[in-house]
Amino acid sequence: MTISYLCPLCDTSLSQQGKSYLCTQNHCFDIAKEGYVNLLPVQNKKTKDPGDNAFMIQARRQFLQEGYYQGFCDKIVSVAKEVQAQPSDISKHAVKAAAKNAKGKPTNAFNYAAASAYSLPYPDNVFDLAICIFSPAKPSEVMRVLKPGGVFIYAGTGPRHLRELAEMIYDIANEHKGNPLDFTDCSQFSAESIHTHNEAIKVERSNIPNLLAMTPYYWSASEDKKKAIESLEELTVELDFQIRRVEKLK
Ligand SMILES: [Zn+2]
């Protein structure tokens, strides 16, 4: 089943015509050469270039391609069942990278859009499964787009995630606060289960700068501390993830 995007300006269905999406009022959104559509109207952006910046995304991509988070991915798959994905991401750079990555791989049909997580460009009751990893989400919006009985997987960091890295940067390393979203207030909330994934990984020297650059620590660490971390031969860090599985009423 193809799910139509909704126009972010007038909320009517968009249909693809050539290399653009058009709504009934002729609002037009071009498909970029990387294969994604930007449904984020300029007036909705808080900055000219919202989301994670290109430097962080490049670091994250290189790090993740090494397979350090494979165990975490496997855990998400075991919590959710395999379905066709139609992800939205406010960061144009992240969507561009994802679209490029999937291009030419014929096993799945993917659609990529840069859009706001607070105003999803989809009709009501259309998804069996929605997944949000380390990103903001709005419970009422997620519930709106899920089918009755649909599942939402919301993954974030647990209290001990990358603790060794934090301890090298801060004198006092605070524990992460985890996922703060509350779905229990939503009228369509049915059930929630919480899963964790913990694992120690050994990061090789060549990948340590990428790990550092994809974390918020990069921006608060002094140059001296960054240099000290980047010159380590190997870094063993704890991964601590929390995966929440939320179900919508049938
Ligand atoms: Zn429109």
Image: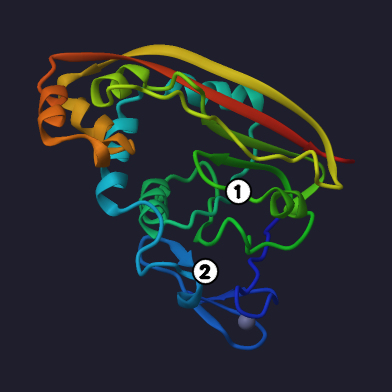
Outermost residue toward the bottom in this view: 25
Which residue, given by chain and number where applicable, does mark 1 sit on?
137
Residue contact between numbered discs 2 and 1, judged by CB atoms under 8 Å:
no
Residue nearest the viewer, comparing 160 with 7? 160
Please tell me whether residue 152 is drawn above or below residue 118 in the rendered image.
above
Three-letter residue code for mark 2: Leu
Q: Nearer the viewer, mark 2 or mark 1?
A: 1
- Image-based side of 191 in relation to 17, left or right: right
Left or right? Give the position of 6 relative to 209. right
Is residue 56 found left or right of 27 in the rendered image? left
Q: Residues within 10 Å of mark 2 (few under 14, many from 20)?
A: many
Mark 1 neighbour density, 10 Å: few (under 14) some (14–19) many (20 or more): some
Q: Residue at x 35, y 24 (%)?
A: 67
Query: Which quarter of the image is occupied by the C terminus?
Result: top right
Q: Secondary structure at mark 2?
A: loop
Q: Residue at x 28, y 53 (%)?
A: 54
Residue 76 in the image: x percent, y percent?
Answer: 57, 27
On residue 39, the disc is 2
